[in-house]
Image (cartoon, helix red, strand yellow):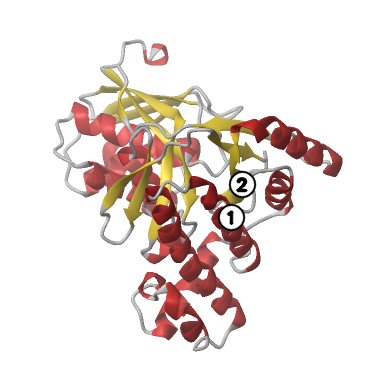
Amino acid sequence: MRIFGRRPEGIWSAPGRVNLIGEFTDLNDGYVLPLALPYAAQAAVARRGDGLVRVASAQRALGASPVVEARLDSLRPGSNGWASYVLGVIWALRETGSELSGIEVHIDSDVPIGAGLSSSAALECSVALAIADLYGLRLSRTELARIAQRAENDYVGVPTGIMDQMASLCCRAGHLLFLDTRSLEARQVTFDPFDLSLVVVNTGTRHDLGTSAYADRRRECERAAQELGVPALRDVAPETMDCALAKLSDDVVRRRARHIISEQGRVLEVVALLKSGRLREVGPVLTAGHRSLRDDFEVSCAELDTAVDVAVTAGALGARMTGGGFGGSVVVLLEDAALDAVTMAVTGAFAERGFFPPEVISVVASDGASRFV
């Protein structure tokens, strides 16, 4: 914390995540299956006693102020640029009754920004865990996840579900987090690929959930649930999907519902395959999920579709977009021996189409947030 002229009291780290399967189901109280990435946001934090908040970032935007300052009692929901995710966590903690006297935060992160890998949740969760530890707040990981989600929903103004924050705080190395986003019951599912690899293709196409059709999709799903007379689309069993869809008169709403209901089924199918050691059979389920996101949920784009199609054609077992869509990343399951061929094929296809050069990243299931120093 050289910028603040003193040493931090500690450094806390929280990872980004990639969701293997279960896209947008968390907006419908459904199941998700993420893993934590080996890329994280680190928050170097120290307390203050004067009611002042000071925030700095090693990745601050060009031309932005090196330090953002605010008083604790002046924090209000609204845009504060790159610092809003930090200020939002502090605001949400105070809204839930936590007494804070001031804080200094310096952020450094290697989670790709705008890639659909939850760089914002990593930032929120590293700060939330740091403040909870420093101030002795007796908050569980689940409670901290809710606070971080509230920061993003109510302070920043992005209507995300809770999957990202729960993954960043609760994932374990070598496991996927099988999460019921309604009850927040979480189970660890062993993920040991053996001779397989999981890679992320960052297309370099940035998305902005605040200005994309993300909120529209949420409203369309809520309308479908209302018309079907259920609290949320997770309450429609996959085996009754056809009957339920026939009750929806609007084609767009019907397609949105079909994605969510079928995606619920895919999450459960993947969990069953993993538990029985049939990891290779997960591949086609991922690809089916991408088709549903592309055609029914309509959140894909040319770069994502190209990455999926080319990867599968080049020998991947399966692939799909991950994250909020309209850009970002693709997750690919493949045999180790196919990694070079798939990487070359995707990179070549992007060059031919004039897209940004993609970044292909091998990932392993990593641990969630912790105190780093």
Q: Which mark is residue 77?
A: none
Q: Residue at x 13, y 38 (%)?
A: 138
- Quadrant of image for the N terminus: top left
Q: Position of residue 74 (x, y in %)?
A: 31, 42
| Foreground of the two, 364 or 59 | 364
Residue at x-position 47% and y-position 78%: 241
Point 42% across, 48% down: residue = 274
Left or right of 27 on screen, residue 311:
right
Q: Would residue 217 be found to the left or right of residue 302 on screen?
A: left
Q: Residue 319: where, in percent of width, then height? A: 61, 49
Q: Quadrant of the C terminus?
A: top left
| Amino acid type, callout 2 | Leu
Residue at far right of view: 352
Name the secondary structure under disc 1: helix
Q: Which residue is mark 1?
A: 284
Quadrant for residue 331, please give it. Answer: top right
Estimate how packed mark 2 is, as few (under 14), some (14 to 19) or many (20 or more) residues with alpha carbons within 10 Å: many
Which sits in the foreground, 369 or 274? 274
Identify the disc placed on residue 317.
2
- Kind of residue at disc 1: Pro
Quadrant of residue 294 within the rendered picture: bottom right
| Cα–Cα gap, marks 1 and 2 | 7 Å
The quadrant in which residue 371 appears is top left
Q: Secondary structure at mark 2?
A: loop
CB contact under 8 Å: marks 1 and 2 = yes
* Above or below 48: residue 71: below
Q: Earlier in the sequence, mark 1 or mark 2?
A: 1
Tell me if residue 76 can be seen: no
- Which is more toward the observer, 189 or 169? 189
At which x and y percent is residue 345? 76, 38
